[in-house]
Amino acid sequence: MSGAHDRKRYLTIFGVLVLFTLLEIGVVYTGLARGLIVSALVALACAKAAAVALYFMHLKFETRVLRVTVGVPMVLPPLYAVVLMLEAAWHAALR
């Protein structure tokens, strides 16, 4: 790949990350229920992490095995966070 092509790709991904950040700020001020805000913020954070991993860590151009080896551990913390939020909501509903 040429240097100009790489620069354009990096700037595009940077723009996407800025857009996701602006969306995160917008979500906070929507007035939605707290659970929906937290869920949206977790989803946006996961999307940002995926973009960074795929392009800045060059995983998009690696083998499938390496992408899975890195991707599975990246998915587990947000999944664990969702499980904890669901558990907290369950306990709050029982009160």
Image (tube, grey):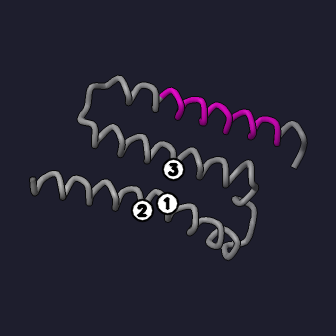
Q: Is mark 2 on a helix, strand or loop?
A: helix
Q: What element carries label 3?
A: helix
Mark 3 vs mark 1: in front: 1
Among the 4 quarters of the image, the one containing residue 16 = top right
C-alpha distance separating marks 3 and 1? 10 Å
Q: Is mark 1 on a helix, strand or loop?
A: helix
Location of residue 90 in the rendering, given as x and y in whole percent from the top left corner: 18, 58
Please name whichever residue, 1 or 74, is drawn nearer the observer in this view of the structure. Answer: 74
C-alpha distance separating marks 3 and 2? 13 Å
Q: Is mark 3 in CB contact (under 8 Å) with mark 2?
A: no
Label 3 neighbourhood size at 10 Å, few (<14), some (14-19), many (20+)? some
Location of residue 18 in the rendering, given as x and y in whole percent from the top left corner: 60, 30
| Of pointers 3 and 1, the one earlier in the residue sequence | 3
Where does the magenta region start and end?
6-22
Q: Would residue 39 be found to the left or right of residue 51 on screen?
A: left
Q: Mark 3 points at which residue?
A: 46
Q: Does the magenta stretch include residue 1?
A: no
Q: Mark 1 points at which residue?
A: 77
Please state the total of marks drawn on the protein image: 3
